Image: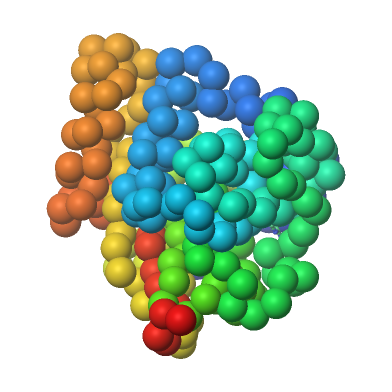
């Protein structure tokens, strides 16, 4: 694997506990570029899971709660977990009406078949070994229901920057880059059927481009292209899968 050559990676739990505070993470979504990425990801999530009203949703690795908040506002009953106490307290302060708790994707306290949708945005991309996380997500979702996650494309335009950082030994959170033809294999689980892949961030989210095209137009263009075979040129792929079995 690409990343095996590099040692300057910090395990994701430690990185978000010790190197990235809630505010540092929240700041990524400010500014013209950050707002664009935030809105794009929100639209992708809604596009993938559709109407969430009344549904029981688990937001795993919720971070500062940006998706927990959206889904709650859309009428879902959301439980959000994250292992970082700092992220959780930041999220609680920001979104008082949402339910947040400390938890680990690899060992969740919920019974089998508990949720209508399990969402893990920007979480699995941090694990080289995704087996245990996938196993747990599949366990807690109800049969026939949805699991949503994403992966970082090894063909992404910012991979060189990440590699240079690693080569120079600049500590960074571990990121698992997946080549498009390996997406299904890397997220394989016997009970999971991958249904849809949307590939976006084909266009570098540069501020001038967002300004020039306008946020909405750029998002529409990305979503349109992201469903064609060009999706595999996107720096990030968002995946909708369902748990095998009949909906009860
Ligand atoms: C890039 S942030 C994503 C946050 C949020 N999902 C979002 O998209 O804004 C990754 C999050 O995964 C959390 N995380 C790290 N290890 C985890 C684990 N073992 N189980 C659940 N979440 C984890 C981190 O604490 C961090 O908040």
Q: Is residue 102 visible?
A: yes
At x 50%, y 58%, the residue is 55
At x 77%, y 59%, the residue is 103
**Can you say whether 145 is above or below 112 in the image?**
above
In the displayed structure, does residue 175 sit left or right of residue 192?
A: right
The image shows residue 177 at horizontal and vertical percentages of 47, 56
At x 43%, y 38%, the residue is 42
**Can you say whether 165 is above or below 34 in the image?**
below
Q: Could you say which is closer to the camera, residue 35 or residue 128?
A: 35
Q: Could you say which is closer to the camera, residue 239 or residue 108?
A: 108
In the displayed structure, does residue 219 sit left or right of residue 30?
A: left
At x 66%, y 54%, the residue is 79
In the displayed structure, does residue 94 sit left or right of residue 44?
A: right
**Can you say whether 9 is above or below 218 in the image?**
below
Q: Is residue 185 visible?
A: no
In the displayed structure, does residue 237 sit left or right of residue 230?
A: right
Q: Could you say which is closer to the camera, residue 56 or residue 84?
A: 56
How many marks do you count on the picture? 0
Q: Residue furthest front?
A: 54
């Amino acid at each position: 694997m690409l990343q095996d050559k590099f040692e300057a990676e910090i395990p994701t739990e430690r990185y978000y506990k010790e190197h990235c505070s809630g505010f540092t993470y929240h700041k990524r979504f400010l500014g013209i570029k950050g707002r664009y990425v935030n809105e794009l990801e929100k639209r992708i999530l809604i596009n993938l899971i559709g109407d969430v009203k009344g549904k029981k949703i688990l937001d795993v690795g919720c971070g500062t709660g940006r998706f927990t908040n959206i889904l709650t506002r859309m009428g879902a009953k959301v439980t959000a977990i994250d292992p970082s106490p700092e992220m959780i307290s930041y999220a609680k302060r920001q979104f008082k009406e949402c339910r947040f708790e400390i938890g680990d994707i690899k060992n969740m306290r919920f019974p089998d078949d508990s949720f209508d949708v399990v969402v893990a945005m920007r979480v699995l991309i941090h694990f080289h070994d995704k087996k245990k996380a996938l196993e747990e997500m599949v366990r807690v979702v109800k049969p026939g229901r949805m699991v949503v996650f994403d992966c970082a494309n090894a063909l992404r335009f910012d991979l060189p920057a990440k590699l240079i950082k690693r080569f120079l030994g600049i500590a960074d959170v571990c990121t698992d880059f997946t080549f498009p033809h390996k997406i299904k294999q890397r997220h394989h689980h016997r009970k999971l059927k991958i249904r849809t892949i949307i590939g976006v961030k084909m266009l570098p989210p540069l501020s001038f481009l967002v300004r020039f095209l306008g946020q909405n137009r750029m998002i529409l263009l990305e979503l349109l292209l992201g469903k064609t075979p060009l999706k595999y040129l996107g720096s990030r792929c968002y995946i909708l899968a369902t748990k095998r079995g009949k909906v009860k």
